[in-house]
Image: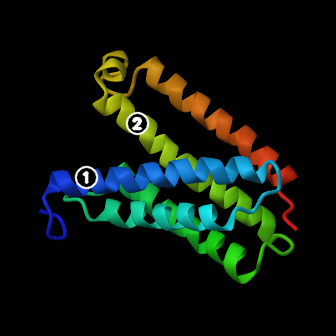
Amino acid sequence: MVVGVSLAAFTKLHVIISLIAIASGLIVVFGMLDSKRMKGLTGLFLLTTILTSVTGFTFPFNGFLPSHAFGILSCILLLAVLPALYKFQLAGNWRWIYVVGAVILLYLNVFVLVFQLFLKIPFFNALAPTQAEPPFAIAQGVTLLVFIVLGTLAVRKFHPH
């Protein structure tokens, strides 16, 4: 049991929240490439990213895990992204701080998604059963490269009115 529900039900909820964060985050980041602010979707992305981190910390565990490091990093990034957007309204340097932070938050969520795909989906697991094999490294490397390109383009192109 986790927060009063079965571990299976809580895991499903966590996954659904994470997938919403990823889907809305992708739309928001691609919107940045056209200088679109997308207030509602941005709020959904940030809220579900917060919920992904919070729910991730409530799973039963023994010791400090890589998922905890990702959760902590996400929380630290949110401490910059949220005020950049909502308090400072993307003025001056707060624009690029928001963009870089938002792109990294999305990347962290997608990194975990790729990890989970290789862990849980038989086809991918057969390619990299321990996540130490080349297919896993290639998938994560391509993911990182895509986000570096997206982040660079977003910083250059996102200038909302």
Q: Nearer the viewer, residue 89 or 139?
A: 89
Could you say which disc has been placed on residue 124 in the image? none
Secondary-structure class at tag 1: helix
Q: Residue at x 41, y 66 (%)?
A: 51
Q: Quadrant of the C terminus?
A: bottom right
Secondary-structure class at tag 2: helix
Amino acid type at image mark 1:
Thr
For disc 1, the marked residue is: 11
Q: Residue at x 81, y 45 (%)?
A: 153
Task: Of the two numbered discs 1 and 2 on the same chain, state the one appearing first in sequence.
Answer: 1
Percent coordinates x, y for residue 55 in the rendering? 33, 64
Crowding around mark 2 (Cα neighbors within 10 Å: few <14, some 14 to 19, many 20+) is: some
Q: Is residue 135 left or right of residue 68?
A: right
Identify the image quadrant of residue 79: bottom right
Percent coordinates x, y for residue 115 in the rendering? 40, 36
Q: Nearer the viewer, residue 41 or 75?
A: 41
Percent coordinates x, y for residue 122 in the rendering? 28, 22
Crowding around mark 1 (Cα neighbors within 10 Å: few <14, some 14 to 19, many 20+) is: some
For disc 2, the marked residue is: 115
Amino acid type at image mark 2:
Phe
Q: Is residue 44 left or right of residue 89?
A: left
Distance between the alpha carbons at the discs numbered 1 and 2 = 16 Å
Residue 58 seen in the current view:
yes
Compared to residue 83, the image places residue 154 above or below, namely: above
